[in-house]
Amino acid sequence: MNLFLTVLDYAGTFVFAISGATVGVRHRLDLFGVLVLSFAAAVSGGIIRDVLIGATPPSALVGWHYVGITCLAGLLTFFRCEDIERLRNPVQLFDAVGLALFAVTGASKALAFGLGPVSATLLGMLSGIGGGIVRDILVAQTPVVLRSELYAVAALAGASVIVIGKQFSLPELPVLVVSTSLCFGLRFMAIRYGWRLPIAAGRDDQ
Amino acid sequence: MNLFLTVLDYAGTFVFAISGATVGVRHRLDLFGVLVLSFAAAVSGGIIRDVLIGATPPSALVGWHYVGITCLAGLLTFFRCEDIERLRNPVQLFDAVGLALFAVTGASKALAFGLGPVSATLLGMLSGIGGGIVRDILVAQTPVVLRSELYAVAALAGASVIVIGKQFSLPELPVLVVSTSLCFGLRFMAIRYGWRLPIAAGRDDQ
Amino acid sequence: MNLFLTVLDYAGTFVFAISGATVGVRHRLDLFGVLVLSFAAAVSGGIIRDVLIGATPPSALVGWHYVGITCLAGLLTFFRCEDIERLRNPVQLFDAVGLALFAVTGASKALAFGLGPVSATLLGMLSGIGGGIVRDILVAQTPVVLRSELYAVAALAGASVIVIGKQFSLPELPVLVVSTSLCFGLRFMAIRYGWRLPIAAGRDDQ
């Protein structure tokens, strides 16, 4: 189980790093700036989670695994950016995968550290959206999490399923599959069909 | 006394959440984005303070109180934003109340954790201004704390009174009243009469 | 040796505070905003490092030394900004000195707390660039670290020399001199001659 969580975590790191690198290339950062943005997008959510639960130094800074994975993703994106751009909306797609993987592993880690259900759900959501928030702030944009279709809601849904599964002691693998699929599915459908939450009514006429 | 501090803390959370939600509605975020901004504006200052004094997990993430309070404030602002907008400069007013309450409770908590007077004053100020900084950064604006009339100065003044009161073992309730009033009063008068600190002289002709 | 590190740390704090204050004056912040930006630019890197290695409360918040040094630098810049502006590119120059000093002391502190070579190198780099990142985010700009000539690379190089020196138990003073000179030299030459890393090829025609 731990091995499976680790593999999921590395996969999420890789896809979030590609999402960060793609934003970096689009903003015409240089090679190292792209690598920094890969790293920041991939590990910020987990670092924020680890700092908040008191698990210092954060796992993303221990050893060379995360640095290696994000550098690989960053270099791949940097030198093959046209291939990656050619995919439809690659930033959003990779972002949705990373969001689902990180929300789920984040909530699991918070539960493993003994936090209660509300905290674990929030920390799962934060693990998922933290990297995207830091990535967008670093290029001076309002984070996509605050603007786009069902972004944080999807992370919250995925994290909730993990926490509910733990509360009722449901078998772990199905819970992982359902939570990840729910989060990715919600976000993907929202991108595909433009599902969005309402905006405050009284301001529409501005 | 602890009960009183808790009530003050909840009240500050509520008004800061309204301030965050109002900014979110003004920037036309969707419902969940408004709730995220409510939460971020209300608890970021306290979370930063707790992380810096090593009190993890931060109290704002434990239990459902803060989530519930900020969601309530966010929903109220979202569905009644015209009523709230009709008040004169509501963001600034709620912001001033939250600033005073958070600077005071933040300095008190830092003292309770055994920090020295300089640290406690700084952490009180940071508790007060942290939420507003995070709120403004999330919508890609220079934080109001760096631009506006006596903002951080007011938080610093409120936190200083708490620390001085503790140093001289003055009775707690009057110290609380004086510090909160001083911070709110300074900020309110600064908004009302445009009190501001000087800007560097040599740059005026630009 | 510890005394020497402390002196270096105070010197780095002073020059980073001047860098922060200069940005604040340029953005026409008021006196207190300039002081806040001095403090944020000077201590954010160290505070982030201390939080990540679990050394709370961060040393920059304990005692009055850092507050005093950054206030002095901020006041000097505020009232003498024309003199400071008259120096050629003062922000960049002070920034390069602070970058070198902080990357080196940051990596040393991380090693002293028992972190491994990869983590210590990353934390050294982060100590160097963290203040500049926070400074630029606070005035709503993309951080210079992501755009400019060999910025984070220089910090990484300086931190690497410290870590390599420790691994091979080389004498401390020469290692300190070499690492600081390498970081400052790289950054200075990059500013002087416009050395930069490549930008992703396929995007040049946009």
Image (cartoon, coloured by chain):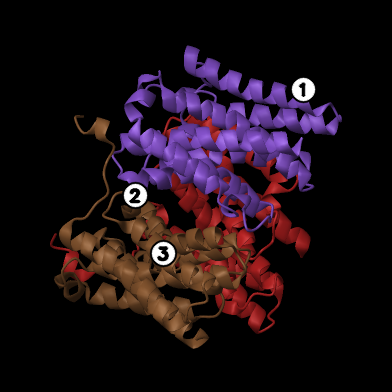
Chain colours: A red, B brown, C purple
The percent position of residue B19, horizontal first and vertical second, equals 31, 67
The dot on residue B146 is: 2
Q: Which residue lies furthest to the top in this view?
A: C193
Please indicate, yes or no, whether residue B133 appears anywhere in the rendered image. Answer: yes
Q: Mark 1 lies on which chain?
A: C
Horizontal side, residue B8 vs residue B120: left or right: left
- Which of the two residues, C109 or A120, is positioned nearer the viewer here? C109
The percent position of residue B41, horizontal first and vertical second, equals 39, 64
Q: Quadrant of residue B70?
A: bottom left
The percent position of residue A175, horizontal first and vertical second, equals 64, 73
Question: What residue type is disc 3 on?
Answer: Gly
Q: What element carries label 1?
A: helix
Q: Which chain carries label 3?
A: B
Q: Relative to B135, say whether B172 is above or below.
A: below
The residue wearing badge 3 is: B128
* Label 1 in the same subunit as label 2: no
**Is there a contact, CB below 8 Å, between mark 3 and mark 1?**
no
**Is there a contact, CB below 8 Å, between mark 1 and mark 2?**
no
Horizontal side, residue B160 vs residue C53: left or right: left
Q: What element carries label 3?
A: helix
Mark 1: give few (<14), some (14-19) or many (20+) Cα within 10 Å. few
The residue wearing badge 1 is: C174
For the point 57% across and 73% down, the residue is A119
